[in-house]
Amino acid sequence: MLTKKTILCIVVSFLSVLGTGVVTSVPSDAPDDIAALRDIKKKQALREKYGIEDKMVLPFEPIPIIEIPGYGNLSAPLVCDELKIQSQNDKEKLAEAKEKVYLKGFYEGIMLVEGYKGQKVQDVKKPIQKMMVERGEAMIYMEPEKQVMSRSADECVVALCDQWYLDYGDAEWKQQANEALKSLETFCEETRRNFEATLDWLQEHACSRTYGLGTRLPWDEQWLIESLSDSTIYMAYYTVAHLLQGGVLNGQGESPLGIKPEQMTREVWDFIFFKTSPFPKTNIPKEHLQRLRREFEYWYPVDVRVSGKDLVPNHLSYYLYNHVAMWPKDNGKWPQAVRANGHLLLNSEKMSKSTGNFLTLSQAIDKFSADGMRLALADAGDTVEDANFVETMADAGILRLYTWVEWVKEMIANQNNLRTGPADTFNDRVFSSEMNSGILKTEQHYERMMYKEALKSGFFEFQAAKDKYRELAIEGMHRDLVFQFIERQTLLLAPICPHLCEYTWGLLGKTGSLMKASWPVAGPVDEVLIRSSQYLMETAHDLRLRLKAYMLPPKSKKGDSKPPAKPSHCTIYVAKSYPPWQHSALSLLGKHYKTNNGVLPDNKVIASELGALPELKKYMKRVMPFVAMIKENLEKNGPRVLDLELEFDERAVLMENLVYLTNSLELEQIDILFASEADDKVKEDCCPGKPFSVFRSEPGVSVSLVNPQPCNGMFSTKVDIRQGDSRDSIVRRLAKVNRLIKDLSRVKLMRYEDPLLGPRRLPVLGQEEQGKLLISNKSVFNINLEEKKVTLADNGLTVDIGDTLVYLVH
């Protein structure tokens, strides 16, 4: 006779128990079951449909059997009420409820039932299962989790049959596999974690089958070893295959040593693979066997095994297990490295013929070329994350390669126009160091098979270093450095784009194939110099942002405010040391960093200690944001951000690149001063590495600059002449207005002998310099703003230039 409790479980939850083992399928802890119980209690029609009488369900409430932290002893009703689940039809909410309750119940739940009271749920499941089977209340029942389909799309019938298993759960064997994993290079922490998780749960594995290809089980020849178990040490055969079957891949080739397949007995293989094995009884000559052994010893162990990430939980783990089983006392034969790859996506989607999202290799090469494909594939991804081949990125890559080759051709054609002499300017030295750094980084990435990173450091960043050098080298790029860069870039990119690099190698006039060239040797890397160049670029970027903010119109309620005129001058203040309040904060942080082995305390601790310093009391609103900024920079740039002084001369870097900064901001003049020469506000806001800038507009008198040369496109223009201007400053200002002027040294600046009548006379063709005097480099312009008058001081003489000057371009 069934009890009331048994009837309740059968009515509500029999189907959920079937095939899932022992689960808490009761209304107190299963959201589906409490929803079903509530439905059947509320709906009389539902009870009538299944022939359930009122007395079988209405008097009953869920019985607590498990206490779950945070959910109490009736977790299912509680979570159903929280999610406002109305019936069994709320499938999405019920799935969410199960996610909340089941895992927490299994790992943290405590039993309330007598006999198991106080024990964890996860500890009592097996004993309960065993008890129910022994009492005849349950039976072992197995079925697939879902329908099983073959590769030919046929529905499979699954049967439970006799089987041979490899016991990967054996404690001693598992321990050895873990030892092999410790010394294994996985190139990625996620791959290592996947191996660790697999070795942790891996137990028995069915290793045989009755049909198909494979090796017979030596002790039971009716069985074949299935492929995952049989393909884990076959690479040992590769070491001697060339001596057994020549160059024929199908195994039918003649052995160079004259060895026949039937001669390769187990004893012979033992002699080849194991150092301690005795010489076998065989008619194979001893010198041939010793040669086979030498080949194996030379080539083994496997330096690296490259495979898919989906094989880590099975094939690659068996690979470790079987190697330690074969050579338990010779860890020199254990695998050295496993490189697991992700799958390949196409345009961010899984490749599928049914959706049309696929690309064959031949189609891809026709579309993008071999090197274009290789570049895009290298850039698709390195880690176990799925790599993404994006066609637009492949197109962009081809464009980059084309641009690179065209630039090489341009440099070869114009090499005589490049600068020669000593390559010792600031930007020359930076460029050289960045090239050397790129070589070292790229070599490391290639060694670790991180091809995306190698492409990043060996092509994208390498090209960026060249572009920066071209931008900053106002005096012109140095010929030796340019061609050194081209040669190095060609060698760094060759593993990924060999065809294009071979072509570039030929453009350089190199004899022999690029494939025979050596890897470029990196010279010294001056990290401080590279960081000083990075500081220069960051300062230029910051100055551009400040100039943009300066040009914004002031806020006005009427909305009729006009933006200020574009400034002509800028003063940049640099600080040798931090302001006193920042100095104190940095000193405290540096002290904590040293005493706590590179760890800073919580902000509360830092704030209380800084608040106790009397010199910081008036700055406390600014101190903690400053501390937060230092902490952020500490993670990015390391402990050097705690230094109280910069590692390079900030003012010297800016002074050496003053022309670049002036041109970049399109200003007339930039002055670099120390913050100690400025007012208190500048001293407060200026610190090492963060210069302070002040923009201003210097007044001037507008003067016309006329070009009388015929048919050259040089039109008349107006420029402002400011107090103290020289001939060179006027020419530079003119070149900013007239972009056709490329070489300033070819510009002649002249004044009229008669400043009043001169501009009124028609120029005579071929006699453009008649009636004009050359303005020398020593001349100084002076202005009178009230009278709008410009005079020129030269060799002690002061002359009026009128309102017009003449420029000639030769």
Image (tube, rainbow, N blue to C red):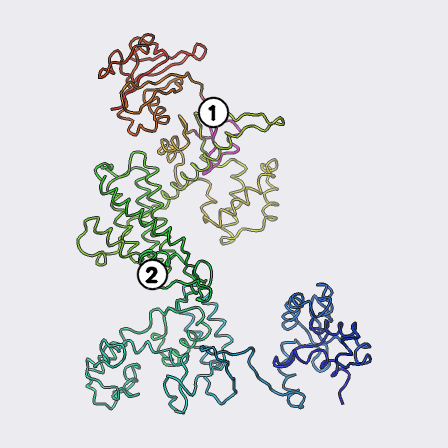
Residue 504 position in % (x across, y down) = 24, 50
Q: Which residue is mark 1?
A: 696
In the displayed structure image, the side of residue 78 where residue 421 appears, left or right: left
- Residue 329: which quarter of the image? bottom left
Helix, strand or loop at mark 2: helix
Residue 125 within the magenta-colored segment of the rendering:
no
Residue shown at the point (72%, 80%) measured from the top left: 9
Tell me if residue 285 comes above or below residue 511 in the rendering: below
Q: Which residue is mark 2?
A: 447
- What is the span of residues highlighted in magenta in the rendered image? 673-697
Under mark 1, the amino acid is Arg
In the displayed structure image, the side of residue 486 where residue 10 appears, left or right: right
Under mark 2, the amino acid is Glu
Residue shown at the point (29%, 16%) measured from the top left: 750
Quadrant of the rendering where the N terminus is positioned: bottom right
Residue 518 position in % (x across, y down) = 23, 56
In three-dimensional space, the C-alpha distance between marks 2 and 1, rounded to whole angstroms, equals 54 Å
Quadrant of the rendering where the C terminus is positioned: top left
Q: Which mark is residue 251?
A: none
- Residue 309: which quarter of the image? bottom left
Q: Looking at this view, is 9 or 148 the one in front? A: 148
In the displayed structure image, the side of residue 76 where residue 300 appears, left or right: left
